[in-house]
Image: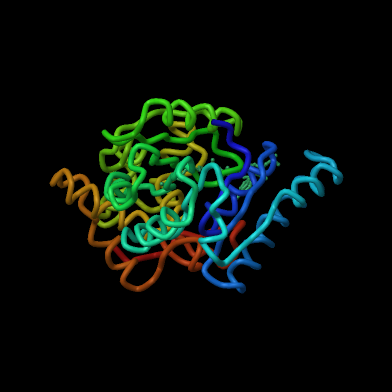
Amino acid sequence: MTIKQVGVVGLGVMGAGIAQLVLQTGYAALVNEMDKNLLNKGLNRIKTGLEKLCEKGKIKTEDKDAMLQRLSGTVNLSDMASCDLIIEAVFEDINVKTEIFIALDKACKKETVFASNTSSLPISKMAVQTSRREKFIGLHFFNPVAVMPLVEVIKTIATDPQILEIAINFVKSLGKYPIVAKDNAGFIVNLFLTPYMLDAMRAVGEGVASINDIDMGMKLGCNHPMGPLMLADFIGLDVINNASNILFNEYKEKRYAPPPLLVKLVTMRYLGLKSGRGFYDWSDPKNPVPVDFGI
Ligand code: 3HC
């Protein structure tokens, strides 16, 4: 099986990043959003991403134009019938994701491989709702997609080994490094990364140290590109809260439970970078300032 056309459902930060990468590596991309307004926003996000690469001299203008010629968009999932691989990257709601896959399953040719970019929801629960559970995998990209070299490839107990191989080779063709995970909550990276960030939040809540000192400790002491609290803001506190609940429900271990401070921030819709405030005030995104919680 040869992958030529890749479908991407959902054009938020992750979906648009994946579509851009797919175009840059020579594939055609058919992208989908719920309505015309969101579709146009997503298409613009992809175009802007490619234009920035042009400005930096990383790709030639004619290459960018060729990439954009291979890009098309639709608001109808039924238009995605001809895609060889479809990557779903909508928000983390199992019901919404499942509905999308049921619609795609009805529309697509039987060879089409389905993938979810979920960071924490069970792939099996989506796969079982389709007629192609053996052609169903997880492809978990990291944010920012353009920069992070890793993709987790998640196999369920029903995934056909040949499909897994195709997925691994696809990831390599994108210039990313594939690691294979079983369909367990947290896969590989979030199993370790989530409790690390939760620990840092608990430390803030318990007054162990300031936000700045916790982050600088890990940044300068361990050479991480950003500290755990800034990373949490960068990923989105709602996303981490979600992942935390899923991990806690699965493993029933205290270290996965959402810390009270995280719950309070999410309740107030202080979600980090995307809402302008979380552990940091992001009024100036280039110069985030730690928030004083008065702890
Ligand atoms: N999109 C595209 N490119 C981006 C980008 C974005 N959103 N953000 C940064 N870049 C590029 C810049 O253009 C620049 O490229 P260049 O060197 O070719 O000019 C390069 O990345 C470095 O950017 P900056 O100099 O602006 O900034 P930094 O050096 O501070 O790096 C960072 C920014 C890459 C975000 C770095 O801080 C980092 O790696 N942070 C950790 C990110 C991380 O851990 N991500 C994983 C999160 S977990 C996840 O995604 C899983 C999910 O399930 C939760």
Between residues 102 and 14, which one lies in front from this camera angle?
A: 102
Q: Quadrant of residue 157?
A: top left
How many numbered dots are placed on residues in this image? Answer: 0
Q: What residue do we see at 77% from left, 51% from top? A: 69
Q: What residue do we see at 40% from left, 51% from top? A: 229
Q: What residue do we see at 64% from left, 49% from top? A: 29
Q: Position of residue 215 (x, y in %)?
A: 43, 46
Q: What residue do we see at 13% from left, 46% from top? A: 252
Between residues 200 and 38, which one lies in front from this camera angle?
A: 38
Q: Position of residue 127 (x, y in %)?
A: 32, 47
Tell me the quadrant of the picture where the C terminus can be found.
bottom left
Q: Position of residue 32 (x, y in %)?
A: 56, 60
User: Does residue 171 appear in this view?
Assistant: yes
State ligand 1's quadrant.
top right
Q: Position of residue 196 (x, y in %)?
A: 32, 42
User: Does residue 279 appear in this view?
Assistant: no
Tell me the quadrant of the picture where the N terminus can be found.
top right
Between residues 226 and 62, which one lies in front from this camera angle?
A: 62
Up-down: is 259 above or below 37? above
Up-down: is 109 above or below 104? above
